[in-house]
Image (cartoon, helix red, strand yellow):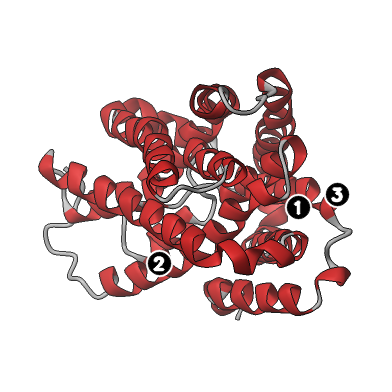
Amino acid sequence: MLTALTRLFPVWALLFSAYALWQPEWLSDQKSLIVPCLMLIMFGMGMTLTASDFAYVLRRPWLILLGVFLQFLWMPLLASMLSLALKLPQDLMVGMVLVGSVAGGTASNVICYLARGDVALSISMTLVSTLLAVVVTPALTWLYVGHGVSVPVLDMLLSLLKIVLFPVVVGMTVNRLFGRRMQAIQTLFPLLSVVAIVYVIGIIVALNAGGLAEMGITLALAVMLHNAGGLISGYGCARMLGQSPQVSRTIAIEVGMQNSGLAVALATQYFTAKAALPGALFSIWHNISGSLLAAWWSRSPRTGDEPA
């Protein structure tokens, strides 16, 4: 039952977004709940991780490096190019670059599992990119948009330590000390994460209800192209390097599915509500595209899918 509810995440996100557009006043004053919701999601991710996940990184480091390369070099560059090509306003370009500069999304591990990918590799890539993002995300944001807006790099770094690293470490510690006793609670965290991110999306949509219709089509195109560019480049690069379909799917999902909730939190805290729109739309779209890909790939036979 819980799994079925979690898989319907795109539906809940769309329905709640529609409600936020219809009744924005109910959610628009709840901006302060964005960061706590995100910390809850990262804590839940930490609850799924153990020391063995770090060992996996050491066994296959070059696959992790490929994902990190695409995650932090290609995705922010693509976000910047799309923003310039589509002539997005400065606020929306900041939001696009933030989406491109954050780590892989926490939902990517679930999508990878549904797509019959390499889940251990997916978790390792998410873990490494999440830890690196603490330093890399502020630096990349400054690199791409620092000439046009003031980028508080140190403040962003401290926020990422609080929002990402601290709850992940606490979650891993709780899992280490009380894992067996908390198995029943652990099964609830995927659903709690879905509820939390849907709520965050609703708040952002409500905050931008007035301007969303004006920039909707152009911004939606930018977000869809950005997501597609990550999925295609991740799969294509892995296949060109001789990796199996299973590994290629995993890298595609990790690169194409960003931690857009974190981009939303950073945008609302350090920039403008409008800068949070790309992250909010990406949160909806990348789960729709990821779910559709997972449904397609899950029908593929496992023959020859073992990791190279």
Q: Is residue 258 above or below residue 56?
A: below
Q: Amino acid at mark 2?
A: Ser
| Picture disc at residue 12 | none
N-term-proximal mark, 2 vs 3: 3
Q: Are marks 3 and 1 in contact (CB under 8 Å)?
A: no
Q: Which residue is mark 3?
A: 32
N-term-proximal mark, 3 vs 1: 3
Q: Measure the C-alpha gap from mark 3 to mark 1.
A: 10 Å
Residue sitting at x 36%, y 56%: 225
Q: Is residue 163 above or below residue 274?
A: above
Residue sitting at x 38%, y 34%: 77
Which quadrant does the N terminus fall into?
A: bottom right
Q: Amino acid at mark 3?
A: Ser
For the residue pair 131 and 188, the one nearer the viewer reads as 131
For the residue pair 268 and 248, the one nearer the viewer reads as 268
Residue sitting at x 75%, y 79%: 22
Q: Is residue 206 left or right of residue 44?
A: right
Q: Secondary structure at mark 1?
A: helix
Q: Measure the C-alpha gap from mark 2 to mark 1.
A: 23 Å
N-term-proximal mark, 2 vs 1: 1
Q: Measure the C-alpha gap from mark 2 to mark 3.
A: 29 Å
| Picture disc at residue 37 | 1
Query: Which quadrant holds residue 204?
Result: bottom right
Q: Is residue 74 visible?
A: yes
Residue 198, image x, y percentages? 67, 65
Q: Which residue is mark 2?
A: 289
Residue 159, image x, y percentages? 73, 30
